[in-house]
Every structure is written in C-alpha cells, then in structure tokens.
Amino acid sequence: MGAHAEAQQEVIKEKIWTRDFILICLANFFIFFGFQMTLPTLPLFVKELGGSDQLIGVIVGIFTFSALVLRPYAGHALESKGRQFVYMTGLAIFVVSVGSFAFIGSIAILLIVRVLQGVGWGLSTTATGTIATDIIPTSRRGEGFGYFGLSGNIALAFGPGLGLALVGKISFMSLFLICAAFGLVAFLLSAKVRYKKVEEIPEKAATPRFDIFEKTAIQPSILVLFITFTFGGIATFLPLHAIERNVAGIEAYFLVYAALLLISRTFAGKIYDKKGHLYVFLPGTIMILIAMILLAWLPTTFILLVAAGLYGFGFGTVQPALQAWAVEKAAGNRKGMANATFFSFFDLGIGLGAIIFGQIAFLFNYSTIYATGAFSILISMLVYIFLVMRARKLEASH
C-alpha cells in the first residue's frame, strides 16, 4: 500500500501541465506575439523613416546587444531579488518601449528606444526560462522545455504574418500600440504566477565580481550562437529578399516555419530526455543547413515554403535540447545564471547576424546573407562533432 501511494505521488509530482506552467506559457505567448509582430515590420518602418539596409541591421542588432549586456545582471537578480521582480520589471519596460515606437519620427530616437526595449527583453526572457526551469519536473525537462517553447513558437507562427498583413491596412502607430497591448496582457498574466522563493546562499559561496556566465552552460551556448546567427538574416531581410526575387508568400513562410517547429517540439524534447543530444543535434542542424542553401537560391514560393518547413523542423528539434543541456549540469542556485548564459549567446548570434548581414546586403546582395548563414550552421556541426569526440576521449581515459 505504501509503495502504491509513493508511486501515485511520483505520478502527481511529475506532472508538467500545472496551473503555474499554463500561466507562464500564456504570458510567454503574449510577450512573444507582440515582439514577433514587430520583427518583420520594423525594417519596413526604418525604410519609411529613410533608413538604409545597414541602418536596419544596426537597429535590429542594437536591441539584441542591450539584451545581451543585461542578461548576466538578470541571472544574478533572479537569485537575489527573485523571479517575479525581474520578470515583471522586464515586461513593464518592454511594454513601454514598444508603445513608444508609435510616437517616433526619427531614426536616432528609434535607436535609443530599441536599446531600452532590449533591456526589457533581456530581463523578461532570462527570467521566463528560469521560471519554467523551476516549474518543470527535472525528469521531464527536455519535454517540458519543448512544450514551453511552443508558446513562443505559436506566437512566431502568427505574429510576423499578422504584423505584415496589418502594415498595409493600418498605420505604424496603431500597429505598435497593438504590439504593446499584447505585452500588457503578458504582464497581467505574470502577476498570477506563484514564483519560487529565492534560496539563501551561504556566505562562502559568495559570487565572484566578474561572474557573467555559468561554466556548465558554455558548450550548448556556443552551439546555439552559430545557429541563431542565421536568425538575423531571416527575420530582418527575408521580406526584402522575397520582394527583390518577386517571390510571393512571405506571410506563409512564417506560418509553415512555425507549424513544423510545433510538430518537432512535441517529440524532440522526449528524445533528448531518453537518449541525449546526440540523437537530435545533427539531424536538426542538417535540416537548417539545407534550408539556408534553399533561401540563398530562392527561385519560387514553393522553395521558400520548403525552406520554411526544414528550418522550422530543424530548429524545433535542436533548441529545446540545447536549452535543457545548458541548465542540466548547473547547481540549484545557478539555474538562473545558466539560462542567462544560454540566452546571452542566443542573442549574440541574432545581433551579430543582423549587423553583419546588414553589411553583406549593402556590399553584395540578399542571397549572400543565406549562403553565409549556411556556412555558420556547418561550423556549429563541426564544433559539435569535436565536443562529442573530446567528451568520449575523456570518458575513455577515466
């Protein structure tokens, strides 16, 4: 009887879909939805204000760099000031900055507000990954992160397409106020979550002054950098690339991408939990590599949508595994820092991609952006093979 009760307790304890998990997924969905609507529309807004491709790259990139600078602080604040303080502060800053886009008439002011938006994004996304880590049962972390990631991915499915559809019908002012309203919904939902209390850290475990990353999270974080490097090119320049090639269906690109991302998320996390990253990383990156080659070519809408499906399926396979890998070896009081490290590299990839691709678009053409992206994915695969072989050698020597 005792054993049976224990087994029942185990089943209850291992539940993923709790009240708090559903709330944090919904909050994550709304903040991402508001954000994703601005992604393909902001370059068009910059063009309307008279900006060049280089300026588009800088405005997209500066956002991720300010998020990046904030992430280590966010990681520490999560352990000292608590999850709720960091998350809700980040959401509030994000809502105010996106709402401010509605009233901007100059590129210089837009740059400043983008930096502020990055601060809000850096705080809120570092916090939300850590809050999810607290809520998801350890034994189902890969699966849980897969479901949690779906909330952002569903937003990705419909956000960019809705943003692009509205651009022709309403003013940029109305568009950005709608985006801010989605962020406000996330803020109100986040107030209902029951957050984990901050752990007391013994004095001797005092944090060194230059503690800006978690060592155990470095390997998966480096890999994610090479992968998200390609994001900057897709989110920022794909609408312009499609126009230049006379290829229709850019709204459908984001839908197909996210649909395949959703499908892969539902089982890739489970494969990671059972078999480890070896079974998900290389198959996922091969698909992303093919997608980048197809985007560089881009003759028709059909090829655009095939690339969308491959990229979505590949990224949905790889990302939850890398995030779970990043937090799994970190100590209990370092999970926030591990998430901060992972997302710092995630952001660094996007920021570098946007700025470098802006320069490539200016010097060469949009097609070269995607060829460069394919090369970046190839590097991630080689680095991964090197890390796996080195780990096996170390195991064999022990």
Image: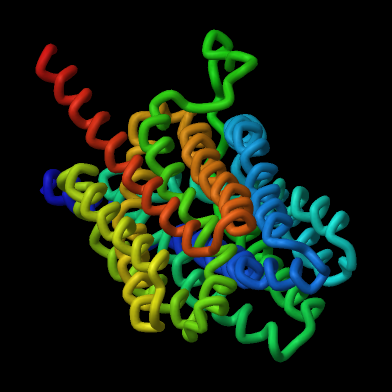
Residue located 28% across and 42% down the image: 381
Image quarter in which the C terminus is found: top left
Compared to residue 219, the image places residue 188 above or below, namely: below
Give the quadrant of residue 68: top right
- At a point 15% along the width and 20% down the height, the residue shown is 393
- Give coordinates of residue 360: x percent, y percent: 57, 53
Q: Which of 367 and 86 is in front in this view?
A: 367
Q: Residue furthest bottom?
A: 169
The residue at 70%/48% (across/down) is: 62
In the image, residue 63 lies at what x, y percent? 68, 50
* In this picture, residue 56 sits left or right of residue 262: right
In the figure, is residue 97 to the left or right of 185? right
Q: Does the image show residue 10?
A: no
Where does the image place residue 344, in percent across and percent down from the top left?
A: 54, 39
Q: Which residue is drawn at 58% across and 17% down?
A: 207
Residue 43 falls left or right of residue 255: right
Residue 360 seen from this side: yes
Q: Position of residue 38 (x, y in %)?
A: 66, 68
Q: Quick check: 49 above or below 123?
A: below
Tally of numbered discs? 0
Q: Which colour scheme is used?
A: rainbow
